[in-house]
Image (cartoon, rainbow, N blue to C red):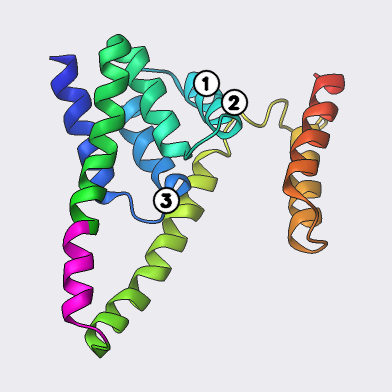
Amino acid sequence: MIYLQLLWVFIKIGVLGFGGGYAMLSLIQHEVVDNYAWMTTTEFADMVAISQMTPGPISINMATYVGYTAGGFFGSLLASFALCLPSLIMVYFIIRLFMNKKGNTLMSHLLKGLKPAIAGLIFAAGLSMMNAQNFVQIGKGENNISIVICVLAFVASYFFKANPILLIVLSGVVGYFVY
């Protein structure tokens, strides 16, 4: 039964997850943590961190990790395959459609309409990661170093175009010494 659930969940995420891995985070969290309770919010946050550090797309890494946690080795293969299958099928048909409808204004308008939806999904994923498990010791009069690290990393990245890898390493070093 777990294999059918994994297949269904990750095919659904693969169909609905426009915008890449980070846009899929909120969908994956909803299914994995809220609906099926295959892991806790803390475990999910740890999985996101590990998935970002390992090579490959974050969504595939997360599907593999969730599949392994819920159904072992076969579960990891099934979840990864199920996540990719809708994209492979859609890309095949979209390529065929684009080849037949080159220069069509309706198609260009549809693609322009997807951009705000993708931005909204990425923003929702970012907001879903702003929880007590990722921002420890938040409160009045307490040590709010997590918020300071977050704000400084945002400012350095957005306004000063700092190297993201350097920001990740520096944040990790600060977190190691503070926590």
Earlier-in-chain disc, 1 versus 2:
1
- Residue of label 1: 42
Q: In this picture, is 69 found above or below 92? A: above
Earlier-in-chain disc, 1 versus 3:
3
Residue positioned 34% across, 35% down in the render: 30
Q: In this picture, is 87 found above or below 41? A: below
| Distance from Cα at disc 1 to Cα at disc 3 | 23 Å
Q: Quadrant of residue 139?
A: top right
Q: Does the image show residue 85? A: yes
- Image quadrant occupied by the N terminus: top left
The answer to if 169 sits in the magenta stretch is no
Which disc, if any, is residue 133? 2
Q: Could you tell me if the residues under marks 1 and 2 are in contact, i.e. CB atoms within 8 Å?
A: yes
Residue positioned 55% across, 33% down in the render: 55
Residue 129: give x, y in percent of width and height.
54, 38
* Mark closer to the observer (3, 2): 3
Pick the residue in front: 171 or 86.
86
Residue 27: give x, y in percent of width and height.
34, 41
Circle 2 residues within 10 Å: few <14, some 14–19, many ≥20: some
Q: Which residues are magenta?
A: 92-102
